[in-house]
Image: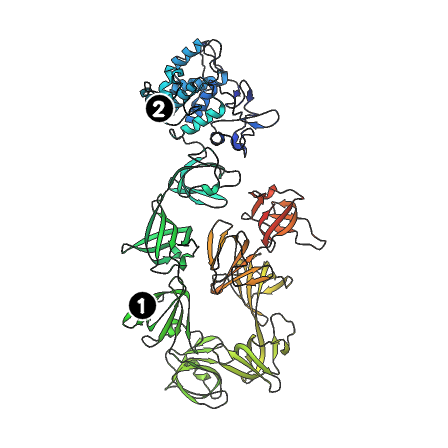
Amino acid sequence: MTMPFAGRKLLIGALAFSLVAGSGVIIPTSQNYVAAAALTTPFKDVTSGHWAEKHIAKLALQKIIEGNTTTSGAFVFRPSENVSQQEAVLMALRFAGLDKKADQDEIIGFPNSFSVSAFFKAYVTLAFKEGLLDQVEEFDLASKDTKNAWGTKPATREWVTKLMVRAIGQKQEALNLQNTASSFSDASQISAIYKGYVNLAAKLELVKGVTSVKFDPKANVTRASLATMFSRAESQYPVAYEGQVDGIISRITDNAITVYSDKKETSYSINADTLYYTYNTETPITKQQLLEYGDVTVIARDGKALYVEVKGDKAHTSTITGTLDRVIASEKKIYVWVNDKPVEIFYNDSLSVVDSDGKALALTAIKRDSAISIVQDAFRDTPIAVKIVAAPQASSTSVKGTFYGTDGELITVMQGTTLVSKFMTDAVTLEIAGLTGATIGDLIKEADEVELTLNEADQVTKIKVANRNVKTVAGAQIASFVYDKKLLTVVDASGGNAQALYFTDKTKIEYSGNLITLASATSLLTQNRKIVITYTGNSIVSLQFVTKYTGNLVSMNSASNLMMVKLDNGSTVALPYNSAYVEHPSITSAAFSDLKTGDLITLELNNTQDRVATIKVHGNAQYEVVSVDATAKKIRVKNAMTAVFELSVISTEITNEAGAKLTVEQVAPGNLINVSYIGKQAVTARTVAATFGKVQAVSASSVTIVDLAGQTTVYNVDAGFTAIKGTSQNNASNLIAVGDYVEVQKYEGNKTQISVAIGESRIFTSYNIASAQIWTEKVSDSDNRNYFNVNSNTKYFYNGNVTAATAFKAGEAITIYGFRNYAIAVVK
């Protein structure tokens, strides 16, 4: 029994033995008693490659063991020094999560023969109460050893083994093995009271012999050995340590690991200081050796993973095979036919899609009815697809047949006696010879012979009518109009070739860019008025009252005073122009000599429609937004060729990259905008979606990029692909290499432009956290680009390791990768 002191209550002093301090060294807790987790590398005297490094690091981060600071300032563990019995007790209590139950204010008395340092008395008492120690047995052992104080006596291998087995609640199992023969050659040296405990510890692989056959029971236990024993014991006695989570790795990126635990996912940042181990080896592994979708233990502080241990070899996944039916990207799900039954499969942004050769694919590139293999996780209530493997996909194909009908999503054609239906893309185009701006509504059921062009996802991207002949007459003149007959007689621009044509319910009539009804147009259908008319057979498809023409310049003849323009519908017009005014988007006082063959121009006519009054040249420019004046509806912009100027957008349609309309206030400084001009007027301004990232893989047909947030995207190299590196530009992927930092811009029509960042060598001077800018030395007196904007996604590397902006020192040479003074990555 523990004997209480008589008299007043005693207070235990604040001085404590560190579990890992040198024997007899007392460390003041409030000053030098430092937790190992506070340091990137816990202990200076446990070098990389130490045989117990894994276990020491883990227990330090679990706060089971602690270190101390030497007089020289080094934080140390002293792995080869002996551990005392009282220190081993405290370590065992911390291992079992019981140490907080110790009452340091309790009045404790032990027999004179049982000597324990003051700080450890409450812990030893608690160990007796919790069954980690047998009080009668320990008092008896202490009374027989008059030379050594029980508390400071070095702990032996057999004594520690019993303490550890009782700490994991396996006392009875040990007693059951008391009379079992030992596999150790020196079993006769193991004291009788410890035999069952040693047998069980060896069976559970909590302890190992000093050799394959020798246990050496009387040898003292070093701090490294004790850390190893308790670390191994955690497999038998799991405890919820602060900051530790057990779960399944659901995602790994360059800078984070995501763990699925308790039906939720948590992401932890990782860097060069994160330690990686696996359950069946003592030496560290690399991040690349982590088992995705496998069991893992993570010890983290403030959202950062400090220790990651793989807990097994099994990936919690399952694989199913079937044929792809449909991809619904908006809901992140696909439908697959499995054993002739439709199965709904969900996915997320981390989905990996490859062909059977391992080449990355876009999910939309897999054709309908393609055979696919889907790897799903097996740990969520609703499994998520993590990888899809498809057979190599053939290039685009086409379908021909007679138009049968459409519901807006599907188009159906008749092939012989079989109806074939295909989904249409949102950007599907319709081509009818001679008919500009044709829509699906212009198709004639069971009459039009059509050819459907399919993309790699088996969706219709283009519909071409093969048997329709639509004719256009530009500059036609009205000869007569009979309203009740809906009959219009026209002649061509020369006054000949009369045509009698009829308006139908589908005829489109346009005046000054607006659609009007036939009733509204009646007063305008007067003799000699110029129009642009399209017709098929004797039916009018469209009629446009001419106030202007838009097309490409074919020729200008100063002698005849005629300029010829080819319109979008393929027809041409010739008009006098010698008194016209020329308006050019980039030339202040433009003249006829500034017009080039092929220029897209708009000709505004005079009141009598017989000559050109104004020639407006179309143009496009990309700018960087400097600032926005929402009140005056002006945007200050610049580019490489143009200094900062104010762009008025009062009459400009502003949209984002998806085509949704924006207000001036929604255009942020730093954005890129593409501006389309007609003459001096900015007609449209469209923001450009820019994504920054690093190239992960390159092939002739695709480029795989991991953006700064860790998302992976595959970009197909197709007709809309452009690559830019420095002054070089082409439509292939050979300018791009793995490891390049890039900017990806998406344009209308599904066009992709990838620009490679050229590293810029600079001398670092400072980092301003308030303005989020890195400053460098000027390379010349006129250098005004010696600062670079950064944000939370900017990456920093110092000698190959991930670091922070604060790690760089003034005078160090750095390389900056970025665009428009925005840094993607800063490398030392």
Q: Is residue 718 above or below residue 186?
A: below
Query: What is the x, y in percent for residue 75?
Result: 56, 28
Q: Is residue 587 above or below residue 359?
A: below
Please identify the residue farthest to the bottom as the structure is shown: 496
Q: Can residue 337 be spotted in the picture?
A: yes
- Image quadrant in which you'd find residue 601: bottom right
Number of dots carrying numbers? 2
Query: What is the x, y in percent for residue 769?
Result: 60, 45
Please identify the residue farthest to the right as the structure is shown: 781
Three-letter residue code for mark 1? Val
Three-letter residue code for mark 2? Gln
58 lies left or right of 682:
left
Viewer-nearest residue: 777 or 228: 228
Label at residue 170? 2
Viewer-nearest residue: 54 or 493: 54
Q: Is residue 547 above or below residue 454?
A: below
Query: What is the x, y in percent for residue 320?
Result: 32, 50
Distance from Cα at disc 2 to Cα at disc 1: 71 Å
- Image quadrant in which you'd find residue 467: bottom left
Image quarter in which the N terminus is found? top left
Q: Circle 2 — which element?
A: loop
Label at residue 420? 1
Looking at the image, which residue is at 32% across and 52% down? 321
Q: Circle 1 — which element?
A: strand
